[in-house]
Image: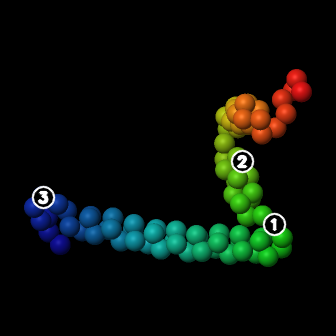
Amino acid sequence: MADVGGIASEQLKSYIERIERLEEEKANLQADVKEVYAEAKGNGFDTKIMRQILRLRKMDHDDRQEQEHLLDLYKRALNMEPGPEE
């Protein structure tokens, strides 16, 4: 294919095809992840909690500590759990 309107057609086609293949791979991986969650749920695990754990594991240790500290602070402010002085 030749250039059309200043666009390298073959290069564009190559990019589009690569993206399509990657999107297909991504869909397959997402289906695999869904199957693992279903298996875990079938064995009695709470998948919502598993998702939270995965989010926490992706975080930097310091960021996670800060977030947990703020969560505790907010819960105490809303009387959702006792504070250290109680």
Give the residue displayed 84% in from the left and 70% down from the top: 44
Please name the amino acid that badge 2 sits on.
Answer: Arg
Please name the amino acid that badge 1 sits on.
Answer: Phe
Which comes before the other along the chain, label 2 or label 1?
1
- The reply to whether the C-beta atoms of the residues labelled 3 and 1 are less than 8 Å apart is no
Q: Is residue 20 left or right of residue 27?
A: left
> Residue 57 shows which numbered tag?
2
- Residue 73 position in % (x across, y down): 73, 31
Quote the CA–CA distance across marks 2 and 1.
Answer: 18 Å
Outermost residue, right side:
86
The crowding category of the residue bearing disc 3, from other C-alpha atoms within 10 Å (few below 14, some 14 to 19, many at least 20), is few
Element type where label 3 sits in the image: loop
Which comes before the other along the chain, label 3 or label 1?
3
Outermost residue, front side:
79
**Nearest to the observer: residue 32 or residue 56:** 56
Is residue 65 something that shows in the picture? Answer: no
Quarter in which the N terminus is drawn: bottom left
Residue of label 1: 45
Q: Is residue 83 shown above or below 8?
A: above
Residue of label 3: 6
- The reply to whether the C-beta atoms of the residues labelled 3 and 2 are less than 8 Å apart is no
- The reply to whether the C-beta atoms of the residues labelled 2 and 1 are less than 8 Å apart is no
Give the residue displayed 72% in from the left and 74% down from the top: 38
- Residue 37 position in % (x across, y down): 71, 70
